[in-house]
Amino acid sequence: MSFIELSIQIAIGLIGFSLIIIFYRILAGPSTEDRIVALDLLTSNAIAFIAVYSLQTGSIKFLDVGIIFALISFLGTVAFSFYLERRTRK
Amino acid sequence: MIELVSGILILLGALLILVSAIGIIRMPDLFTRMSATTKASTLGIGLVLIGTSFFWGDLGIIVRSIAIIIFLFLTAPVAAHIIGKAAYFDKVPIWDKTHIDELKGKYDEESHELK
């Protein structure tokens, strides 16, 4: 096993473990804002997972999904926060 | 040589992503959590994408990676600012060891405008 294959395996393990940890914060987060921050981080880490996964499978088509993920993550965060802030404004 | 460089970049990026995940679970309140996640995860994703484009060496991949990195670097601070503003007005509890709250009393509670 060459160095790049080994590092891809380790990176997939590390990123998958951090996805599990972030998912715990989505489930357990005390406030709605905690869940929004965790969801934003989950989507951004999914982009990194997609990049490493494209290295593992040798297919380059997955990187387009990453661009869409970045867009959707930003729009979702802004929309959620906008309505949370509107809710507390009188 | 290219494989060595891209492997090291991917490992560094994955480590930074793990650091940001540990930060989101170990930090005491929302605002410190945000300071841990936005910085570390943005840098980690950037490193992983740079390593990926190093490995392929293809122009299309490099352009896509740079597009994702620029978009993330532009949007992550904006998103963090908007969440922080919403959280401050939603009275999310601040950690009891935080001594400085510079926004206290400077915002109008009703209309959310600066006094």
Image (spheres, rainbow, N blue to C red):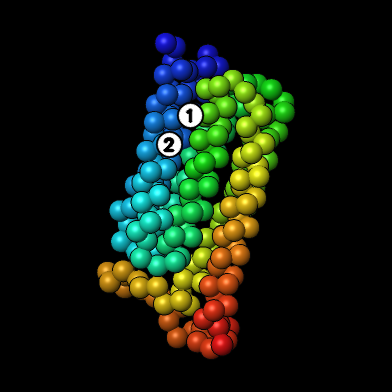
Q: Is residue B61 above or below residue A1?
A: below
Residue hosting label 2 = A15
Q: Quadrant of the C terminus of chain B?
A: bottom right
Q: x%, y% of residue B91? A: 41, 77
Q: Is residue A67 above or below residue A1?
A: below
User: CA separation, marks 2 and 1?
Assistant: 11 Å
Q: Residues within 10 Å of mark 2 (few under 14, many from 20)?
A: many
Is residue A72 toward the left or the right of residue B14 in the image?
right
Q: Is residue A46 above or below residue A6?
A: below
Number of the label disc, if any, that sits on residue A33: none
Q: Residue at 72% of width from left, 28% of height from top?
A: B60
Q: x%, y% of residue B35? A: 43, 57
Question: Which image quadrant is residue B2 in?
Answer: top right
Closest to the observer, A2 or A39: A39
The amino acid type found where label 2 is placed reads Ile
Residue hosting label 1 = B10
Q: Nearer the viewer, mark 2 or mark 1?
A: 2
Q: Residue at 46% of width from left, 71% of height from top?
A: B87
Q: x%, y% of residue B25? A: 33, 52
